[in-house]
């Protein structure tokens, strides 16, 4: 049973793997469209498209609401705590602890998603005490499958998740990383 204590503090700053994962701020609003208004992000993620200034404001407001509700955090991926290069999400519930991510097109190819996923997984294991984190990915999304494998996740033998988003059907595979495996690979 979940306690009434919220799992996330009001402010979070995680460091590791050459990254600083930090809370989104008002100062980030201008940079967000350049990160999220891209056909790949529109296709593979639930992030709204087109992603303009109004969408950025709505996303920041939603981030704050989700944090206040206690189940989800969205953090900016940075290398120095300053300019955001993407986002990493952690959704924690009694059923599962899921990680998601999106990296701006200009910042891909640097291993940012892999490193951010590993830092967020370590946070889930060490601070939340979870035994497993998952990624839900479309098998056709070769970039995300590569992130999963490079971050040490394995495809789980669980039913596929089928749905529709933005008028497009999807089928998600579930990838998992167990706490003991993550600790032994560091």
Image (cartoon, helix red, strand yellow):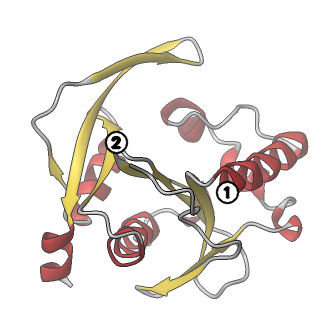
Residue at position x 88%, y 65% in the image: 26
Please say whether residue 176 is visible from this viewpoint: yes
Q: Going 43% across and 65% down the picture, which residue do you hit?
A: 109
Q: Quadrant of the C terminus?
A: bottom left
- Residue 102 appears left or right of 128: right
Q: Which comes sooner in the sequence, label 1 or label 2?
A: 1
Picture coordinates of residue 131, whole percent (x, y): 23, 63
How far from the left and from the top, in percent, is residue 153? 20, 57
**Compared to 177, does 54 lie above or below?**
above
- Which of the numbered marks, if any, corresponds to residue 81? none
Q: x and y percent of residue 130 in the render?
A: 31, 63
In the rendered picture of this protein, how many numbered marks are placed on residues? 2
Q: Secondary structure at mark 1?
A: helix
Residue 175 percent across, percent down from the top left: 23, 46
**Mark number for residue 95?**
2
Q: Residues within 10 Å of mark 2 (few under 14, many from 20)?
A: few
| Residue name at image x 63 percent, y 77 percent | 12
* Residue 19 at least partly seen: no
Q: Is residue 26 above or below residue 175?
A: below
SS state under label 2: loop
Between 82 and 60, which is closer to the camera in this rendering?
Answer: 60
Q: Residue at x 49, y 62 (%)?
A: 108
Answer left or right for 8 relative to 119: right
In the picture, residue 138 is in which quadrant? top left
> Which residue is label 1 attached to?
67
The one nearer the camera, 150 or 8, is: 8
Label 1 crowd (10 A; few <14 / some 14-19 / many >=20): some
In the picture, measured across the screen, residue 86 lies left or right of residue 162, that is: right
């Amino acid at each position: 049973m979940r306690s009434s204590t919220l799992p996330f503090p009001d402010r979070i700053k995680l460091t590791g793997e050459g990254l600083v994962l930090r809370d989104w701020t008002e100062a980030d609003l201008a940079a967000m469209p350049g990160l999220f208004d891209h056909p790949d992000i529109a296709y593979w993620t639930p992030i709204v498209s087109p992603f303009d200034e109004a969408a950025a404001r709505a996303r920041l407001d939603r981030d704050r609401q989700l944090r206040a509700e206690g189940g989800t955090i969205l953090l900016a991926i940075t290398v120095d705590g300053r300019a955001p290069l993407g986002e990493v999400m952690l959704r924690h519930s009694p059923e599962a602890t899921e990680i998601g991510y999106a990296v701006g097109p200009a910042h891909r190819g640097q291993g940012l998603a892999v490193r951010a996923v590993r830092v967020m997984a370590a946070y889930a294991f060490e601070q939340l005490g979870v035994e497993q984190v998952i990624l839900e990915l479309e098998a056709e999304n070769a970039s995300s499958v590569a992130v999963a494998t490079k971050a040490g996740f394995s495809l789980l033998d669980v039913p596929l998740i089928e749905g529709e988003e933005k008028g497009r059907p999807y089928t998600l595979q579930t990838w998992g990383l167990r706490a003991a495996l993550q600790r032994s690979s560091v």
